[in-house]
Amino acid sequence: MSAIAIEAVDKSFGDTQVLRSISLSIKAGEFVAVLGPSGCGKTTLLRALAGFEPIDRGSIRIGDTLLSGEGQHMPPEDRGIGVVFQNYALWPHMTVAGNVGYGLKVKGLPRQERENRTERVLETVGLTDFANRRPTALSGGQRQRVALARCLAMDAGVVLLDEPLANLDVHLRGEMEAEFARFQRESGATMFYITHDQAEALALADRIAVMNKGVIAQFAAPETLYSQPANEMVATFIGDGQICDIENYQPDHSGYAFAELFGVPVRARCQPNDRPCAHARLAFHPGDLKLTDQGGIDAVIRRMTYRGDILKVELGVGPHDQPLFMNVPAPARIEAGQRVAVTLADGWVLPDLKPEQAPV
Ligand SMILES: Nc1ncnc2c1ncn2[C@@H]1O[C@H](COP(=O)(O)OP(=O)(O)OP(=O)(O)O)[C@@H](O)[C@H]1O
């Protein structure tokens, strides 16, 4: 099992800096997803790790071995890293078994050992009956399994996956998610999984690195990203999060605070060392707003979208008619144009430095 240490990595293409002082410390056997909007640098980070892209500054290590940095650049084939691409990168003229065993042949393993190992890993990924087929005669999910079997055969301690499910339909995605989780359990490999699909990342990863404009916005467990986002970007990127200003912010040093939201008293979670101040920013999810008939914040229902078990309700709130979303269990006796009152069941005060608290 291999731990990965990425330290202060910078990478530019011409004048454009794509990776800005990226540091990630990944434990051996951990499943890490890198999640972020298009163009934020995810693939560049994966390519730097795989050795396809030299870095400008910083270092990348697996265990005690320096792969990139300090004047060194180990070639991809020497890194002991398996890569699974979105387009599978299988040899079309080789059979499934040929594709899986090819890397072992290049490594110089004797034929019998190659065949034994290939047979074993094809069994692991459930493709024994497909050993003699060509990749073109396989489904997308089966091709992805061949790519995984290849990593397994090479005994890769680290497996990098670049949007591996992007070409698959929804049904197959679920199946392959389970396959990846099983693969990791059985191989013990450290997994580094690039995606812009947060449902995938939340379902699979032990920890998620949220990337934005070349920096790591937060690196934490899925539950932490969801309930304690470090900043506005993570708060709004994960789980349809939304943000409101709050006034008269009074933390009580136990991880909770009182404040006013649209002039109405609310209680929210916060960092225990926060200090009182006039203004702060509150993050919450559509499921945190509840309809109430006792007090609450006045709002008007702008629109409703039926989503099966819930109604996604767009509200206009406060003097500036701020749009906020609320999930209401369906069916519900509400309609567009209706005036309602809502309460906040849960929220998190963003720990970004508030202007009043910033050192002068
Ligand atoms: N070889 C290259 N030469 C010049 N610019 C590049 C090169 N590779 C990537 N870039 C630029 O670097 C930025 C980050 O690209 P990257 O592919 O790493 O983003 P990404 O987060 O993986 O995006 P997506 O989710 O759309 O695949 C983009 O602006 C891209 O145009």
Image (cartoon, rainbow, N blue to C red):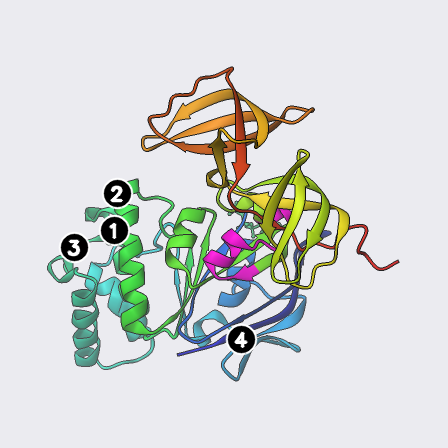
| Residue 312 picture location, percent across and down | 44, 29
* Labelled pair 4, 1 in contact (Cβ < 8 Å): no
* 47 versus 278 height, above or below: below
Tell me the distance, in whole angstroms, between the alpha carbons under discs 4 and 2. 39 Å
Q: Earlier in the sequence, mark 4 or mark 1?
A: 4
Q: Earlier in the sequence, mark 4 or mark 2?
A: 4
Q: Which residues are magenta?
A: 219-234
Q: Which mark is residue 133?
A: 3
| Residue 140 picture location, percent across and down | 27, 47
Q: Nearer the viewer, residue 281 or 276?
A: 276
Q: Earlier in the sequence, mark 3 or mark 2?
A: 3
* Labelled pair 3, 4 in contact (Cβ < 8 Å): no
Instruction: Kindly identify the amino acid type of the residue bearing the numbered disc 4.
Output: Met
Tell me the distance, in whole angstroms, between the alpha carbons under discs 4 and 1. 35 Å
Q: Quadrant of residue 247?
A: top right
Count neighbours of disc 3 (C-alpha within 10 A) and say few if under 14, some if 14 to 19, many if 20 or more: some
Q: Residue at x 14, y 57 (%)?
A: 130
Q: In the structure shown, which secondary structural element does the residue marked by tag 4 occupy?
A: loop
- Determine if residue 39 is in view: no
Instruction: Kindly identify the amino acid type of the residue bearing the numbered disc 2.
Output: His
Q: Nearer the viewer, residue 114 or 108?
A: 114
Count neighbours of disc 4 (C-alpha within 10 A) and say few if under 14, some if 14 to 19, many if 20 or more: some
- Farthest residue, direction right: 360
Residue 1 inside the magenta-drawn segment: no
Q: Quadrant of the N terminus?
A: bottom left
- Return the residue at label 2: 171
Q: Which mark is residue 86?
A: none
* Labelled pair 2, 1 in contact (Cβ < 8 Å): yes
- Return the residue at label 1: 175
